[in-house]
């Protein structure tokens, strides 16, 4: 007897169940897509950054440091990079797909170079997302600041960041160093932040340092 290879027909009830499962899967995917879009969407206006800045942690940061030699004295390098006529978007050289700085708005202080400790501002990027920035130390040897309040998806991975420029005499010139330290929301994300610093922040930091060198040596 030959075998009947015709696949069995599903019952109307089974087809209805499969149809409902298919529709349910589509609706679930659409719902997840909408949620993801809302989470990634920029705010319509700047957040309220009037509250206290986050407390600094004793440890747990993921850090990267880059430096460059500049053929100019430290005081000249500092003055060149802290020219009051320069905006943040003029200084920071974003590339590698990271949104560039679009504008800033002071919230606290007058942002006078050399006297900015305690000053605060928000920073808006080209993708319409924001973060807050407050200066912690501002002298001719060290410029340290803290960033927090990310509205982008970074807020799920980064509690806050601390960055520092350091000006040191090196021969007849200056060794300008820039360190970025990010505190993950959970230690399990430390590896992801390390990859972010290496792949995204590093090109930006190196390009910015090169720009500061070219400006100081011009």
Image: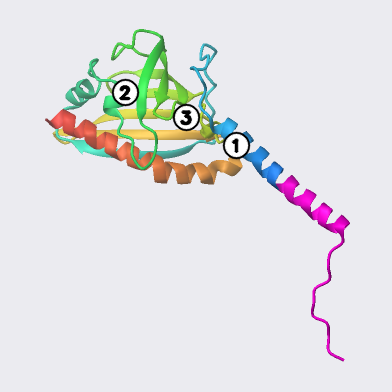
Quadrant location of the C terminus?
Answer: top left
Name, please, the residue furthest toward the left. Answer: 218
Residue named by callout 1: 36
Structural crowding at the residue carrying mark 2, measured as other residues with C-alpha within 10 Å and reported as few (<14), some (14–19) or many (≥20): some
**What mark, if any, has residue 161 been given in the picture?**
3
Residue 187 or residue 208, whichever sits in front = 208
Residue 215 or residue 180, whichever sits in front = 215
Image quadrant in which you'd find residue 186:
top right
Quadrant location of the N terminus?
Answer: bottom right
In the displayed structure, 201 sits above or below 110; it is below
Residue 134 or residue 40, whichever sits in front = 40
Residue named by callout 2: 88
Q: Is residue 22 magenta?
A: yes
SS class of the residue under badge 1?
Answer: helix
Residues in magenta?
Answer: 1-25
In the displayed structure, 62 sits above or below 124; it is below
């Amino acid at each position: 007897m030959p075998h009947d290879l015709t696949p069995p027909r599903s019952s109307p009830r089974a087809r209805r169940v499969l149809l409902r499962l298919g529709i349910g899967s589509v609706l679930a995917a659409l719902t997840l897509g909408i949620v993801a879009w809302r989470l990634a969407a920029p705010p319509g206006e700047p957040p309220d950054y009037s509250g206290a800045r986050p407390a600094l942690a004793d440890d747990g940061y993921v850090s990267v440091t880059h430096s460059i030699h500049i053929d100019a004295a430290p005081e000249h390098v500092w003055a060149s990079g802290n020219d009051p006529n320069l905006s943040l978007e003029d200084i920071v050289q974003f590339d590698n797909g990271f949104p560039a700085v679009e504008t800033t708005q002071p919230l606290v202080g007058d942002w006078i170079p050399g006297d900015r400790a305690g000053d605060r501002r928000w920073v808006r990027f080209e993708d319409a997302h924001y973060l807050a920035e407050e200066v912690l130390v501002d002298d001719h040897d060290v410029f340290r600041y803290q960033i927090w309040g990310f509205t982008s998806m970074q807020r799920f991975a980064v509690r806050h960041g601390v960055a520092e420029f350091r000006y040191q005499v090196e021969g007849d010139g200056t060794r300008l160093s820039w360190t970025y330290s990010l505190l993950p929301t959970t230690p399990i994300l430390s590896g992801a932040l390390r990859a972010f610093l290496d792949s995204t922040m590093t090109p930006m930091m190196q390009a910015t340092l090169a720009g500061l060198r070219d400006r100081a040596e011009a």
